[in-house]
Image (cartoon, rainbow, N blue to C red):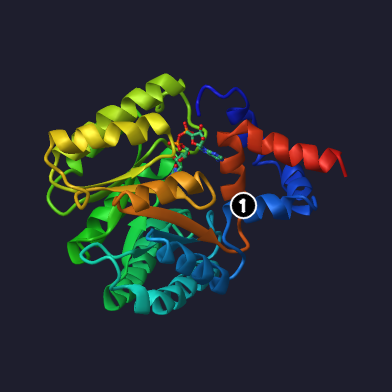
């Protein structure tokens, strides 16, 4: 993660329109996208969901999109989520009391960045999605984006939870503030997905060194496990996965008292192993044509993914 010297370079280059044009036009890109993204359409996401549910895994489905620049685009995203939730309704009972199907939403996709009105627009749109989800028996988790959005995101989650107490929040262990946020969000009924964090952040707000991020993750996980909420352990890191059982035992949590989460296409065998061993294993399934930002964050996490991509471009 943070000790990877290419990470900041890739995340910075990702913002260049020339790099974007190069990556999206390169023929090997599709193969790489297919590794991390279920497909362009809702039907693709539903097919991936079925395969995951059939192998005992749970899902959280994300319609890819971020940095929405106008209200019409945000409304189209809400409509897509409403259609997705309606399609998921028949599977909603699976896994009770914690539904096996959930959706993940990014508030910038729902309009958070639309100027002064942005937070109100995003809240209104998120409420619409939660209302549809409540009717279908599907749950919603609000993704974490870059640190400039953290306060607004957590305050929107707090508002949503007044009406929809099952709405989940995401906290990023690389941020200095997160241990305190974990304490605040570890009350009864609270659902928190803890991840390391995927954005390029300055040293003023985030740990830069992988060892520091890992140590922060373990401190945060301890707070969540000791609390009264439902921790969602989002990591592929074997050291983090191994830390879960002892912490759960220390706080008398059985396999229903927390869940593991991993991304679609990453450590599939480990996902199956955990599901087969009786843990709730939720897979984050992204779909949609707006895969660029998501793909670049996955490349930045793991230089070998980038090497695989560049090798296939060069060897054509
Ligand atoms: P790392 O130390 O990065 O990786 C550990 C090991 O996992 C690696 O050695 C490798 O074996 C495997 N691995 C990790 N990444 C990759 C990859 N890209 N390709 C191939 N193998 C890989 N971040 C946010 O900022 N906001 C969010 O809302 C958010 N939601 C998430 C939801 C879920 C369910 C998950 C699993 C992650 C989410 N993330 C989110 C991303 C997260 O912050 C990390 O960037 C990402 O999970 C990599 O960190 P890691 O804990 O897996 O550990």
- For residue 195, above or below residue 132: above
> Foreground residue, 111 or 292?
292
* Residue 258 image offset from top left, x and y in percent: 24, 48
Dot 1: element: helix
Closer to us: 187 or 123: 187
Residue 309 screen position, x and y as percent: 73, 41
Residue, x 68% and y 37% (percent of image)?
306
Give coordinates of residue 12: x percent, y percent. 63, 34
Is residue 202 found left or right of 153 in the rendered image? right
What residue lies at 35% left-to-right and 72% top-to-bottom? 128
Q: Is residue 130 above or below residue 33?
A: below
Q: Residues within 10 Å of mark 1 (few under 14, many from 20)?
A: some
- Can residue 110 be seen here? The reply is no
> From the image, which quarter does the C terminus lie in?
top right
Residue visible at 56% across and 59% down in the picture: 69
Q: Which residue is mark 1?
A: 35
């Amino acid at each position: 993660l943070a000790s990877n010297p290419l990470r900041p370079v890739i995340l910075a280059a990702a913002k260049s329109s020339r790099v974007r044009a190069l990556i999206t036009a390169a023929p090997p890109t599709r193969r790489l996208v297919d590794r991390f993204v279920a497909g362009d359409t809702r039907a693709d996401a539903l097919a991936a969901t079925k395969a995951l549910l059939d192998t005992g895994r749970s899902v959280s489905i994300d319609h890819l999109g971020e940095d929405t620049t106008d209200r019409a685009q945000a409304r189209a995203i809400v409509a897509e989520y409403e259609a997705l939730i309606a399609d998921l309704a028949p599977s909603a009972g699976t896994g009770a009391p914690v539904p096996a199907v959930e959706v993940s939403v990014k508030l910038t996709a729902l309009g958070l960045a639309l100027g002064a009105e942005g937070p109100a627009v995003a809240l209104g749109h998120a409420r619409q999605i939660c209302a549809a989800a409540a009717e279908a028996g599907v749950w919603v988790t609000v993704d974490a984006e870059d640190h400039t959005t953290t306060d607004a995101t957590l305050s929107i989650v707090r508002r949503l939870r007044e009406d929809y107490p099952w709405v989940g929040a995401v906290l990023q262990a690389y941020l200095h503030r997160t241990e305190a946020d974990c304490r605040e969000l570890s009350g009864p009924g609270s659902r928190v997905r803890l991840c390391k964090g995927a954005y390029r952040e300055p040293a003023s707000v985030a740990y830069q060194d992988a060892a520091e991020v890992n140590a922060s993750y373990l401190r945060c996980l301890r707070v969540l496990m000791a609390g009264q909420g439902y921790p969602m352990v989002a990591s592929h890191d074997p050291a983090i996965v191994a830390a879960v059982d002892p912490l759960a035992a220390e706080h008398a949590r059985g396999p229903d008292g927390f869940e593991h989460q991993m991304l679609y296409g990453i450590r599939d065998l480990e996902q199956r192993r955990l599901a087969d061993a009786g843990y709730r294993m939720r897979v984050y399934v992204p779909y949609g044509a707006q895969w660029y930002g998501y793909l670049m964050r996955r490349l930045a996490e793991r230089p070998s993914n980038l090497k695989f991509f560049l090798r296939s471009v060069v060897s054509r």
